[in-house]
């Protein structure tokens, strides 16, 4: 093990405190505006990498990060549903007006699918559930999309770090490739939606 890594591991808390920190990282990344300041995905990938060096177990890591991500989405949705109009008037939201608009357009265009994809798109990860709450999305379908995306995120990102083996650079490379896969799927979904909408608008001729 590299010396810097050994020193870093020794600085980290142990047991329940370590798990609580990871839970809060996953939770905070799902919150509007706050999520912009928390590099949650990178930290969770690194936590998966540390599993190979004896820090926590992989199953516990997945359980904690999945729970944090899901509860963060639910809390963001709740905030939007009950307090969205008031919170949008705050200066912090006004500063990120363009980001809020982008998340709103993304949600309007893609509905429930936006909840799933936003989980893997850093800038709008926390704001999209909030927008869903403001828009009055029904709780049951929201919970379904949020649950599936949180489970996949909670498995994939620690898994990328774990599969990176003993090389943090390899783990980072896998994370970047996974991001490209998600982006490709998103583009394919948008194209499919655009083509279907275009053909629906075409008048039938006989």
Image (tube, grey):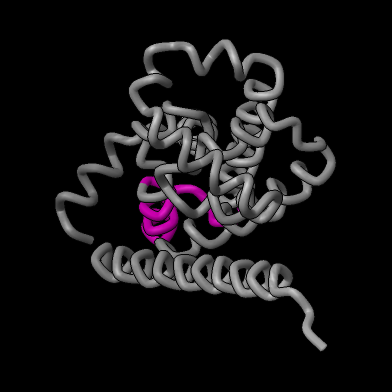
Toward the viewer: 132 or 177?
Answer: 132
Toward the viewer: 142 or 204?
Answer: 204
Quadrant the N terminus occupies: bottom left
The residue at 27%/62% (across/down) is 168
x, y (%) of residue 88?
51, 18
Task: Determine whether, in the image, residue 118 is placed left or right of residue 203.
Answer: left
Quadrant the C terminus occupies: bottom right
Is residue 23 visible in this depiction of the protein?
A: no
Dominant secondary structure, magenta: helix
Toward the viewer: 68 or 18?
Answer: 68
Magenta region includes residue 128: no
The residue at 61%/19% (across/down) is 84
x, y (%) of residue 94?
39, 20
x, y (%) of residue 192?
62, 73
x, y (%) of residue 113?
66, 55
Is residue 183 visible in this depiction of the protein?
A: yes
Task: Determine whether, in the image, residue 9 is placed left or right of residue 20.
Answer: left
The residue at 46%/42% (across/down) is 102
Magenta region includes residue 51: yes
Give the residues drawn in magenta, as a range: 43-59
């Amino acid at each position: 093990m590299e010396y810097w890594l050994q020193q870093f591991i020794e600085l980290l808390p142990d047991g329940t405190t370590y798990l609580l920190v990871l839970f809060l990282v996953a939770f905070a990344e799902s919150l509007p505006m706050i999520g912009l300041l928390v590099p949650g995905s990178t930290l969770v990938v690194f936590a998966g990498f540390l599993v190979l060096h004896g820090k926590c177990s992989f199953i516990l890591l997945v359980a904690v990060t999945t729970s944090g991500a899901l509860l963060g989405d639910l809390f963001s949705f709740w905030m939007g549903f009950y307090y969205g109009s008031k919170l949008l008037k705050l200066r912090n939201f006004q500063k990120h007006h363009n980001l809020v608009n982008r998340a709103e357009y993304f949600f309007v265009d893609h509905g429930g699918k936006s909840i799933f994809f936003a989980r893997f798109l850093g800038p709008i990860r926390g704001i999209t559930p909030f927008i869903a709450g403001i828009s009055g999305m029904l709780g049951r379908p929201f919970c379904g999309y949020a649950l599936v995306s949180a489970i996949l995120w909670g498995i994939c990102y620690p898994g990328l770090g774990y599969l990176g083996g003993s090389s943090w650079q390899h783990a980072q490379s896998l994370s970047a490739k996974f991001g490209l896969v998600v982006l490709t799927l998103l583009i394919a979904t948008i194209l499919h939606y655009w083509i279907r909408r275009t053909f629906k608008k075409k008048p039938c001729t006989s």
